[in-house]
Image (tube, rainbow, N blue to C red):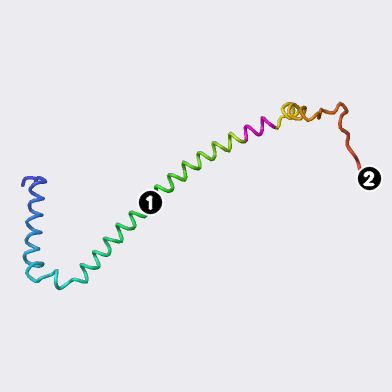
Amino acid sequence: MTKPTWNKLFNLLGIRFKGLYKDKLASKKFMVNSWRLILFVSGLAILVIYSSHKVDQKVFRISKLNEDLKDLRSRHIDMRTQLMSLSKTTIVAQKVADLDLYESLDSPFKIEVHK
């Protein structure tokens, strides 16, 4: 026995489907008698197409939100770096020197309250 090739298998499958259509479906007017089934299958097909469209929309939205999140994280890091550099004592002293405010020459002291 020889091994069948793909072409032979597809030809055999096509012949069987044609026979099924001629014997079962076309002779008994399957389409006319089972309009409810056809309507149900059509409704399911529309539902599948709609749900796949919605999934695609959500995937695109998630991708856009991830890009926005990366952008916001980088902006946050930049702002934090700028804030850290601006809050250094030397920078603050330079900025307030224009207002005639200078560093105190006296060291700070702690106030203790006894109860």
The amino acid type found where label 2 is placed reads His
Q: Position of residue 26 (x, y in %)?
A: 8, 67
Query: Considering only vertical position in the picture, is 46 above or below 74?
Result: below
Q: x, y percentage for residue 109?
A: 88, 34
- Asked whether residue 81 is drawn in magenta, I would say yes
6 lies left or right of 53: left
Whole-percent x, y for residue 29 in the image: 10, 70
Q: How many marks?
A: 2
The residue lying toward the viewer, choosing from 24 and 82, is: 82
Question: Pointer 2: what residue?
Answer: 114
Q: Which mark is residue 57?
A: 1
Sort mark 2 into few (<14), some (14-19) or many (20+) by Cα contacts within 10 Å: few
Q: Residue furthest bottom?
A: 33
In what element is the residue under mark 1?
helix
Please, what is the dominant secondary structure of the magenta stretch? helix
- Mark 1 is surrounded, within 10 Å at the Cα level, by few (under 14), some (14 to 19) or many (20 or more) other residues, namely few
The magenta stretch is 80-86
At mark 2, the secondary structure is loop
- In the shown orientation, is residue 100 left or right of residue 71? right
Name which residue lies at 19% across and 71% down: 35
Task: Indicate the quadrant where residue 91 lies.
Answer: top right
Q: Where 59 falls versus 39 (above or below)?
A: above
Q: Nearer the viewer, residue 115 or 90?
A: 90
Specify the quadrant of the image occupied by residue 114.
top right
Label for residue 97? Answer: none
- CA separation, marks 1 and 2? 68 Å
Residue 93 is covered by the magenta coloring: no
Whether pointer 1 and pointer 2 mark residues with C-beta atoms closer than 8 Å, the reply is no
Q: Which quadrant holds residue 52?
A: bottom left
